[in-house]
Image: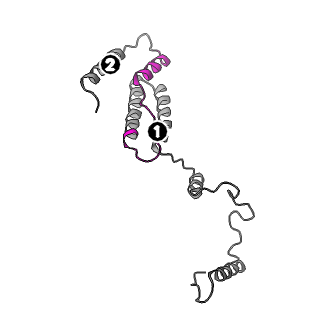
Amino acid sequence: MTELKPPGVSWESWAERQIAEGRRAGLFDGLDGEGRPIDGLDGPHDEEWWVKAKLRRENIDHLPPTIAIRGERDAAVASALAAADEGAARRIVEQINDRIRYVNSHTVSGPPSTVWVVDIDSILERWRAAHPAAPDDEEPADVEPPQQRRRVVRWVRRVRPRG
């Protein structure tokens, strides 16, 4: 079937002859989807139908980073609230905040990002409420209280503005 089109024969008649020879040789017997309607014939025309079909077939979810970060943020908050200790919860939130800052500052394609960083203090307060400390537990000395940390952050922002 790889023969060249002979001169003087129209493309249509040559292609029809190739199809007829293939049918006689049984090349079209037993193909996938034989006897079934073709998907999407009645739907609206989509220029990227083949990309969407490939992603669906291979079970791949691809979203622009500015949209994917929303799901990542929700998963990170849930993971932080379920963390074993406060330090792990803090690390999870700091990591997702770094990722959010990166996406917000580096993504140039897709829709703009509208995701804000996660407030570490509010997540840690929720974590503490969900994980009450035992009476024998003491707060580690290296963790400064949230109120003190807020004051320091506000002072730093006044002294050293962003930019």
The CA span between labels 1 and 2 is: 27 Å
Residue furthest top as drawn:
135
Tell me which amino acid carries mark 2. Answer: Arg
Q: Which residue is the site of mark 1?
A: 69
Compared with residue 104, is residue 139 higher up or lower down, i.e. above or below? above
**Residue situated in front as seen by the camera: 48 or 72:** 48
Residue furthest left as drawn:
159
Compared with residue 146, is residue 72 higher up or lower down, i.e. above or below? below
Secondary structure state at the residue bearing disc 2? helix
Is residue 21 rendered to the left or right of residue 103?
right
Secondary structure state at the residue bearing disc 1? helix
**Residue situated in front as seen by the camera: 28 or 135:** 28
Q: Which residue is the site of mark 2?
A: 149
Percent x, y of residue 64: 48, 45
Tell me which amino acid carries mark 1. Answer: Ile
Q: Determine which quarter of the picture holds residue 12.
A: bottom right
- What residue do we see at 43% from left, 10% from top? 135
**Residue situated in front as seen by the camera: 48 or 119:** 48
In the image, the segment drawn in magenta is 104-132
Q: Determine which quarter of the picture holds residue 161.
A: top left
Is residue 130 rendered to the left or right of residue 139?
right
